[in-house]
Amino acid sequence: MSTVAWSRAQLPDLRGKQALVTGAASGLGLEVALGLAARGAQVVLADRNVAGGEAAVQRIRREVADARVEFQALDLADLGRVRAFAAAWTARGQPLDILVNSAGILPPLQRRTTADGFELKFGINVLGHFALSGLLWDALQQSAAARVVWVSSLVHRHARLDFDDLQSQHAYAPQTVYNQAKLACLVLALQLQRQCVAAGAPVIGLAAHPGVARTALGTSRDGQKRRGVIDHLTDFSFWLAMKFFGQAQDRGARPILHAATAVDVQGGEFYGPDGFAEMAGEPVRVKASAPALDAEVGRRLWQACEQLSGVRYPASDLQAQAGT
Protein backbone atom coordinates (compact mmCIF):
# COMPACT_ATOMS: atom_id res chain seq x y z
CA MET A 1 0.00 0.00 0.00
CA SER A 2 1.42 3.39 -1.00
CA THR A 3 2.01 6.20 1.46
CA VAL A 4 -0.93 8.12 -0.03
CA ALA A 5 -3.32 5.17 0.25
CA TRP A 6 -2.15 4.24 3.75
CA SER A 7 -2.36 7.82 5.00
CA ARG A 8 -5.88 8.31 3.66
CA ALA A 9 -6.96 5.09 5.34
CA GLN A 10 -5.19 5.61 8.68
CA LEU A 11 -4.63 9.30 9.39
CA PRO A 12 -7.08 12.03 10.40
CA ASP A 13 -8.12 14.98 8.24
CA LEU A 14 -5.32 17.56 8.41
CA ARG A 15 -6.91 20.38 6.44
CA GLY A 16 -6.03 23.70 8.06
CA LYS A 17 -2.83 22.30 9.60
CA GLN A 18 0.63 23.72 8.90
CA ALA A 19 3.49 21.21 8.84
CA LEU A 20 7.26 21.40 8.44
CA VAL A 21 9.36 18.32 7.65
CA THR A 22 13.15 18.46 7.62
CA GLY A 23 15.20 16.18 5.40
CA ALA A 24 12.22 16.01 3.04
CA ALA A 25 14.06 15.90 -0.28
CA SER A 26 14.25 12.12 -0.10
CA GLY A 27 13.85 9.06 2.09
CA LEU A 28 11.71 9.06 5.19
CA GLY A 29 11.24 12.82 5.18
CA LEU A 30 9.78 12.75 1.69
CA GLU A 31 7.38 9.94 2.59
CA VAL A 32 6.28 11.81 5.72
CA ALA A 33 5.66 14.99 3.73
CA LEU A 34 3.71 12.97 1.15
CA GLY A 35 1.52 11.42 3.83
CA LEU A 36 0.78 14.75 5.48
CA ALA A 37 -0.09 16.34 2.14
CA ALA A 38 -2.37 13.42 1.29
CA ARG A 39 -4.46 14.26 4.34
CA GLY A 40 -4.73 17.94 3.48
CA ALA A 41 -1.97 19.59 5.53
CA GLN A 42 -0.07 22.52 4.10
CA VAL A 43 3.47 21.16 4.09
CA VAL A 44 6.86 22.83 3.83
CA LEU A 45 9.63 20.47 2.74
CA ALA A 46 12.98 21.63 4.13
CA ASP A 47 16.32 20.27 3.02
CA ARG A 48 19.81 21.40 2.02
CA ASN A 49 19.37 19.56 -1.30
CA VAL A 50 17.59 22.18 -3.40
CA ALA A 51 17.28 20.14 -6.60
CA GLY A 52 16.06 17.12 -4.65
CA GLY A 53 13.60 19.21 -2.67
CA GLU A 54 12.08 20.75 -5.76
CA ALA A 55 11.80 17.29 -7.35
CA ALA A 56 10.12 16.02 -4.18
CA VAL A 57 7.51 18.78 -4.41
CA GLN A 58 6.77 17.80 -7.99
CA ARG A 59 6.40 14.15 -7.02
CA ILE A 60 3.94 15.00 -4.26
CA ARG A 61 1.90 17.17 -6.62
CA ARG A 62 1.74 14.29 -9.10
CA GLU A 63 0.51 11.85 -6.46
CA VAL A 64 -1.80 14.27 -4.60
CA ALA A 65 -3.67 16.45 -7.07
CA ASP A 66 -4.70 19.08 -4.51
CA ALA A 67 -1.47 19.04 -2.49
CA ARG A 68 -0.43 22.28 -0.82
CA VAL A 69 3.33 21.90 -0.64
CA GLU A 70 6.41 24.03 -1.09
CA PHE A 71 10.14 23.64 -0.71
CA GLN A 72 12.43 25.84 1.38
CA ALA A 73 16.18 25.41 1.61
CA LEU A 74 17.50 24.61 5.09
CA ASP A 75 21.03 23.60 6.06
CA LEU A 76 20.95 22.24 9.61
CA ALA A 77 24.75 22.10 9.61
CA ASP A 78 24.88 25.90 9.79
CA LEU A 79 23.17 27.52 12.77
CA GLY A 80 23.23 30.91 11.06
CA ARG A 81 21.08 29.48 8.29
CA VAL A 82 18.82 27.80 10.81
CA ARG A 83 18.25 31.19 12.45
CA ALA A 84 17.50 32.81 9.10
CA PHE A 85 15.06 30.06 8.17
CA ALA A 86 13.22 30.36 11.49
CA ALA A 87 13.12 34.16 11.26
CA ALA A 88 11.54 33.94 7.81
CA TRP A 89 8.93 31.47 9.07
CA THR A 90 8.12 33.63 12.09
CA ALA A 91 7.74 36.68 9.84
CA ARG A 92 4.85 34.92 8.12
CA GLY A 93 2.89 35.12 11.35
CA GLN A 94 1.50 31.62 10.82
CA PRO A 95 1.19 28.86 13.43
CA LEU A 96 3.13 25.64 13.12
CA ASP A 97 1.06 22.60 14.02
CA ILE A 98 3.43 19.76 13.13
CA LEU A 99 7.23 19.82 13.14
CA VAL A 100 8.98 16.60 12.12
CA ASN A 101 12.70 16.62 12.85
CA SER A 102 13.64 13.97 10.31
CA ALA A 103 16.85 15.17 8.63
CA GLY A 104 19.97 13.18 9.25
CA ILE A 105 23.10 11.65 7.80
CA LEU A 106 25.13 8.50 8.18
CA PRO A 107 28.28 9.72 9.95
CA PRO A 108 31.30 9.83 7.64
CA LEU A 109 34.05 7.32 8.26
CA GLN A 110 36.41 10.13 9.28
CA ARG A 111 35.31 12.87 11.66
CA ARG A 112 33.98 16.01 10.01
CA THR A 113 32.43 19.16 11.43
CA THR A 114 29.59 21.58 10.73
CA ALA A 115 29.99 25.23 9.80
CA ASP A 116 30.00 25.97 13.54
CA GLY A 117 32.65 23.39 14.38
CA PHE A 118 30.41 20.67 15.81
CA GLU A 119 30.83 16.99 14.98
CA LEU A 120 28.73 16.57 11.84
CA LYS A 121 26.18 13.97 12.94
CA PHE A 122 25.56 15.54 16.35
CA GLY A 123 25.53 19.01 14.83
CA ILE A 124 22.84 18.18 12.28
CA ASN A 125 20.63 15.63 14.01
CA VAL A 126 20.75 17.04 17.50
CA LEU A 127 21.89 20.67 17.66
CA GLY A 128 20.40 21.72 14.33
CA HIS A 129 16.99 20.36 15.24
CA PHE A 130 17.20 21.62 18.82
CA ALA A 131 17.90 25.12 17.55
CA LEU A 132 15.20 24.95 14.87
CA SER A 133 12.53 23.79 17.31
CA GLY A 134 13.45 26.49 19.80
CA LEU A 135 13.60 29.27 17.23
CA LEU A 136 10.16 28.25 15.94
CA TRP A 137 8.70 28.16 19.43
CA ASP A 138 6.45 31.18 18.96
CA ALA A 139 4.91 29.60 15.85
CA LEU A 140 4.42 26.31 17.70
CA GLN A 141 2.69 28.06 20.58
CA GLN A 142 0.28 29.71 18.16
CA SER A 143 -1.12 26.27 17.39
CA ALA A 144 -3.87 24.89 19.59
CA ALA A 145 -2.07 21.55 19.85
CA ALA A 146 1.34 21.50 18.20
CA ARG A 147 3.46 18.38 17.91
CA VAL A 148 7.25 18.15 17.66
CA VAL A 149 8.34 14.71 16.47
CA TRP A 150 11.99 13.68 16.71
CA VAL A 151 13.11 10.74 14.58
CA SER A 152 15.20 8.29 16.59
CA SER A 153 16.36 4.75 15.81
CA LEU A 154 16.45 1.20 17.09
CA VAL A 155 20.14 1.68 17.77
CA HIS A 156 19.46 4.17 20.55
CA ARG A 157 19.34 1.10 22.79
CA HIS A 158 23.05 0.50 22.17
CA ALA A 159 24.09 4.04 23.11
CA ARG A 160 24.94 6.20 26.03
CA LEU A 161 25.52 9.93 26.15
CA ASP A 162 29.15 10.77 26.85
CA PHE A 163 28.80 14.24 28.35
CA ASP A 164 32.58 14.56 28.47
CA ASP A 165 32.82 14.06 24.71
CA LEU A 166 29.50 14.84 23.00
CA GLN A 167 31.41 16.07 19.97
CA SER A 168 33.46 12.84 19.69
CA GLN A 169 36.69 14.82 19.74
CA HIS A 170 38.61 12.29 21.83
CA ALA A 171 37.26 9.12 20.26
CA TYR A 172 35.51 8.96 16.90
CA ALA A 173 33.79 5.77 15.76
CA PRO A 174 31.03 6.30 13.16
CA GLN A 175 28.58 3.74 14.56
CA THR A 176 29.04 5.00 18.12
CA VAL A 177 28.45 8.55 16.89
CA TYR A 178 25.29 7.47 15.07
CA ASN A 179 23.93 5.59 18.10
CA GLN A 180 24.61 8.50 20.44
CA ALA A 181 22.90 11.03 18.17
CA LYS A 182 19.80 8.86 17.85
CA LEU A 183 19.64 8.43 21.61
CA ALA A 184 20.01 12.19 22.01
CA CYS A 185 17.04 12.80 19.69
CA LEU A 186 14.86 10.56 21.83
CA VAL A 187 16.11 12.12 25.06
CA LEU A 188 15.30 15.62 23.78
CA ALA A 189 11.81 14.60 22.68
CA LEU A 190 11.01 13.27 26.16
CA GLN A 191 12.62 16.22 27.91
CA LEU A 192 10.65 18.63 25.76
CA GLN A 193 7.47 16.89 26.84
CA ARG A 194 8.39 17.18 30.54
CA GLN A 195 9.05 20.87 30.19
CA CYS A 196 5.91 21.58 28.18
CA VAL A 197 3.78 19.86 30.82
CA ALA A 198 5.43 21.91 33.58
CA ALA A 199 5.02 25.15 31.62
CA GLY A 200 1.47 24.46 30.45
CA ALA A 201 2.60 24.97 26.86
CA PRO A 202 0.23 23.77 24.09
CA VAL A 203 2.99 21.64 22.55
CA ILE A 204 3.78 17.96 22.92
CA GLY A 205 7.09 16.21 22.37
CA LEU A 206 7.13 12.81 20.67
CA ALA A 207 9.56 10.42 19.04
CA ALA A 208 9.39 7.67 16.46
CA HIS A 209 11.72 5.28 14.73
CA PRO A 210 11.31 3.60 11.33
CA GLY A 211 12.70 0.20 12.19
CA VAL A 212 15.09 -0.86 9.45
CA ALA A 213 14.07 1.21 6.42
CA ARG A 214 15.70 0.95 3.01
CA THR A 215 16.62 4.50 2.14
CA ALA A 216 19.53 6.00 0.25
CA LEU A 217 21.24 6.92 3.52
CA GLY A 218 23.97 4.33 3.06
CA THR A 219 25.13 5.83 -0.23
CA SER A 220 26.40 8.88 1.64
CA ARG A 221 29.61 6.92 2.33
CA ASP A 222 30.26 6.09 -1.30
CA GLY A 223 33.82 7.04 -2.22
CA GLN A 224 34.99 7.38 1.39
CA LYS A 225 38.18 5.58 2.29
CA ARG A 226 37.76 2.56 4.55
CA ARG A 227 40.40 2.31 7.24
CA GLY A 228 40.76 -1.05 8.89
CA VAL A 229 38.54 -4.00 9.71
CA ILE A 230 35.96 -2.05 11.72
CA ASP A 231 34.96 0.15 8.78
CA HIS A 232 34.50 -2.92 6.58
CA LEU A 233 32.51 -4.74 9.27
CA THR A 234 30.29 -1.70 9.68
CA ASP A 235 29.61 -1.67 5.94
CA PHE A 236 28.80 -5.37 5.95
CA SER A 237 26.48 -5.07 8.96
CA PHE A 238 24.63 -2.20 7.33
CA TRP A 239 24.25 -4.16 4.08
CA LEU A 240 23.09 -7.26 5.95
CA ALA A 241 20.44 -5.37 7.90
CA MET A 242 19.06 -3.68 4.80
CA LYS A 243 19.15 -6.85 2.67
CA PHE A 244 17.46 -9.26 5.05
CA PHE A 245 15.61 -7.21 7.66
CA GLY A 246 14.76 -3.91 5.99
CA GLN A 247 11.41 -2.65 4.84
CA ALA A 248 10.58 -0.10 2.16
CA GLN A 249 10.97 3.54 3.14
CA ASP A 250 7.24 4.20 2.77
CA ARG A 251 6.55 1.63 5.49
CA GLY A 252 9.35 3.03 7.63
CA ALA A 253 7.64 6.42 7.54
CA ARG A 254 4.42 5.11 9.07
CA PRO A 255 5.44 5.28 12.76
CA ILE A 256 6.56 8.87 12.18
CA LEU A 257 3.29 9.79 10.48
CA HIS A 258 1.34 8.13 13.27
CA ALA A 259 3.20 10.09 15.94
CA ALA A 260 2.70 13.33 14.02
CA THR A 261 -1.03 12.98 13.45
CA ALA A 262 -2.94 10.15 15.16
CA VAL A 263 -5.71 11.26 17.48
CA ASP A 264 -4.88 8.75 20.22
CA VAL A 265 -1.26 9.89 20.61
CA GLN A 266 -0.13 11.35 23.94
CA GLY A 267 2.90 13.52 24.62
CA GLY A 268 6.07 11.69 25.59
CA GLU A 269 5.23 8.56 23.61
CA PHE A 270 7.61 6.69 21.33
CA TYR A 271 6.46 4.82 18.21
CA GLY A 272 8.03 2.16 16.02
CA PRO A 273 7.07 -0.91 13.97
CA ASP A 274 5.22 -3.80 15.63
CA GLY A 275 7.16 -6.64 13.97
CA PHE A 276 10.03 -8.79 15.17
CA ALA A 277 12.56 -6.73 17.12
CA GLU A 278 10.75 -3.60 15.86
CA MET A 279 12.53 -3.90 12.53
CA ALA A 280 9.40 -3.79 10.37
CA GLY A 281 5.64 -3.61 10.67
CA GLU A 282 2.80 -1.27 11.48
CA PRO A 283 3.03 1.63 13.96
CA VAL A 284 2.75 0.82 17.64
CA ARG A 285 3.91 2.39 20.87
CA VAL A 286 7.34 1.04 21.84
CA LYS A 287 9.60 1.27 24.88
CA ALA A 288 12.56 3.59 25.18
CA SER A 289 15.82 2.57 26.81
CA ALA A 290 16.52 3.38 30.44
CA PRO A 291 18.96 6.23 29.63
CA ALA A 292 16.36 7.80 27.33
CA LEU A 293 13.81 7.80 30.15
CA ASP A 294 16.19 9.25 32.74
CA ALA A 295 15.04 12.78 33.58
CA GLU A 296 18.50 13.77 34.83
CA VAL A 297 20.02 12.72 31.51
CA GLY A 298 17.36 14.81 29.80
CA ARG A 299 18.13 17.85 31.92
CA ARG A 300 21.87 17.60 31.31
CA LEU A 301 21.50 17.16 27.57
CA TRP A 302 19.05 20.06 27.31
CA GLN A 303 21.48 22.34 29.12
CA ALA A 304 24.35 21.18 26.93
CA CYS A 305 22.33 21.84 23.76
CA GLU A 306 21.41 25.33 24.97
CA GLN A 307 25.04 26.13 25.65
CA LEU A 308 26.34 24.70 22.38
CA SER A 309 23.63 26.08 20.09
CA GLY A 310 23.10 29.41 21.84
CA VAL A 311 19.33 28.83 21.64
CA ARG A 312 17.20 29.03 24.76
CA TYR A 313 13.55 28.15 24.46
CA PRO A 314 11.56 31.31 25.23
CA ALA A 315 8.49 29.78 26.83
CA SER A 316 9.06 31.37 30.23
CA ASP A 317 12.28 29.43 30.82
CA LEU A 318 10.78 25.99 30.32
CA GLN A 319 13.68 24.30 31.98
CA ALA A 320 13.24 26.17 35.25
CA GLN A 321 9.50 25.59 35.23
CA ALA A 322 10.09 21.88 34.80
CA GLY A 323 11.96 21.94 38.10
CA THR A 324 15.05 20.44 36.54
Image (cartoon, rainbow, N blue to C red):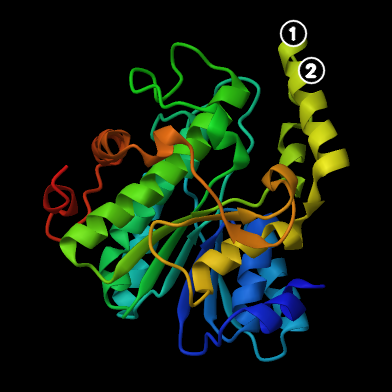
- Looking at the image, residue 116 sits to the left or right of residue 324; the answer is right
Labelled disc at residue 228: 1
Residue in front for this viewpoint, 283 or 167: 283
Name the residue located 84 percent from the left edge and 32 percent from the top edge. Answer: 240
Residue 302 drawn at (x, y percent) = 28, 41
Residue 165 drawn at (x, y percent) = 38, 19
Query: Which picture quadrant has residue 241?
Result: top right
The amino acid beneath tag 1 is Gly
Q: CA distance from mark 1 to mark 2?
A: 7 Å
Q: Residue furthest top?
A: 228
Tag 1 and tag 2, C-beta contact below 8 Å: yes
Residue in front for this viewpoint, 79 or 262: 262
How packed is label 2: few (under 14 Cα within 10 Å), some, or many (20 or more)?
Answer: few
Label 2 residue SS: helix
The amino acid beneath tag 2 is His
Residue 115 visible in this rendered orientation of the protein: no
Q: Is residue 265 above or below residue 26?
A: below
